[in-house]
Image (tube, helix red, strand yellow):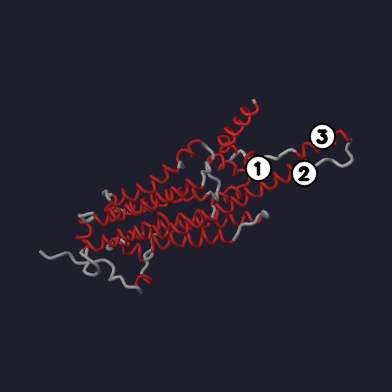
Amino acid sequence: MHAPAYTGPPELTPLRAVTEWMLDPWALVVIVLLTAAYLAGVRRVRRAGQPWPVGRVIACCGLGSGFAVIATMSFLRVYQPVLFYARAAQTVVLLLVVPLFWALGRPLSLAIAALGDKGGRIEAVIGSRAARLVTFPAITTMVLVVIPFLLYFTSWYAAGFTSGVVRELTYVALLVPGFVFFWTLLRIDPVPKAYPYLVSLWISGAEVIGDAILGLAIIADPTLIAAAHYHLVARPWGPSLATDQVLGGGTIWVLGDIVGLPFLVAQLIQMIREDEADAKVIDAELDAAEAAAAPAGGAAGALGSAAGAAASAPQRPWWESDQRFAGRFESVAGPAADADQDGAR
């Protein structure tokens, strides 16, 4: 009995990694429609006299849509049926890279601005109770981590090789959770609920750990994932099936962690900007309080004395008046105040 003849793509080389492409009509149509809708929104907003930075357009249409094309039609698509690590790289790009850059383009803010009065409907949906429940950080993180596990450790993985519908739906199943994850944690678009950035950092850490666990689980798996498919392909070149699977697990682990770096940088930038905005608000409130406490010129003597007494009264530190921090100092001020009252008695 003869072994089945190999009918897949030729051996992968650095040159073929650049030149090997395969058209995916469904993926191309979706990418073109999403990109065209974004550019139409930008044009409408700018015609209305509102600015829309070029950087957002580059992030969404250039990098986001560009990586979507690479994931679905470049050598990653050509070689994903025969190389385990090619499909692993494709998974990381679709789950983390494309959604990150699409989220950085602020598509929801663009849609709200472009639709004018109708944009309020989008804001209403975003602020709904259902949206707050679905985007709860624990839920979005769990979905982002669980989806790849289900993909690689169930029959779902092999089904994508034989069914075009399953393959395209797999792309959607990776892109949507990734976008929701980055959208809710970056907080540069309207979100159902703005959680503190400390929560975002914890969630980011959980995602990094999830990538590592998935990669290690694939590396340590003693059985071959989709063994029947890869044996049937009978690839005559490249690494062995076992080595290929180890390379794929390492790709998910390392590449997933590397992709997380731009996300952490974006979070830090947003945190710094938010702190600067809060500082400006606090400074404005302090300036207003000082202006209100200043005695009015030409007032009567009695009023002037009262104003002078009020102005000379000790001022409470700003952080004791700020609602975000006042509660933290009650336990410190309370015992001291009680001790003063006992001494007075």
Q: Position of residue 8 (x, y in %)?
A: 26, 66
Q: Residue at x 27, y 48 (%)?
A: 154
CA distance for labels 3 and 2: 16 Å
User: In front: 1, or 281?
Assistant: 281
In which quadrant is the C terminus drawn?
top right
> Splitting the image into 4 quarters, where does residue 240 fall?
bottom left
The relative height of residue 148 versus residue 90 in the rendered view (above or below) is: above
Q: Position of residue 239 (x, y in %)?
A: 24, 67
Q: What SS does tag 2 mark?
A: helix
User: In front: 233, or 311?
Assistant: 311
Residue type pointed to by label 1: Trp
Q: Earlier in the sequence, mark 3 or mark 2?
A: 2
Q: Position of residue 184 (x, y in %)?
A: 49, 47
Residue for badge 1: 318
Residue found at the very far bottom of the displayed protein: 15
Asked whether the residues under the numbered discs 1 and 3 touch, taking CB atoms below 8 Å apart as contact, a structural biologist would say: no
Q: What SS does tag 1 mark?
A: helix
CA distance for labels 2 and 1: 15 Å
Residue found at the very far top of the displayed protein: 345
Residue for badge 3: 306
Q: Nearer the viewer, mark 2 or mark 1?
A: 1
Check residue 249 in the rendering and tell me which mark sits there, or answer none: none
Horizontal relation, residue 238 to residue 58: left or right: left
Callout 2 environment at 10 Å: few (<14), some (14 to 19), or many (20+)?
few
Residue for badge 2: 291
Q: Earlier in the sequence, mark 2 or mark 1?
A: 2
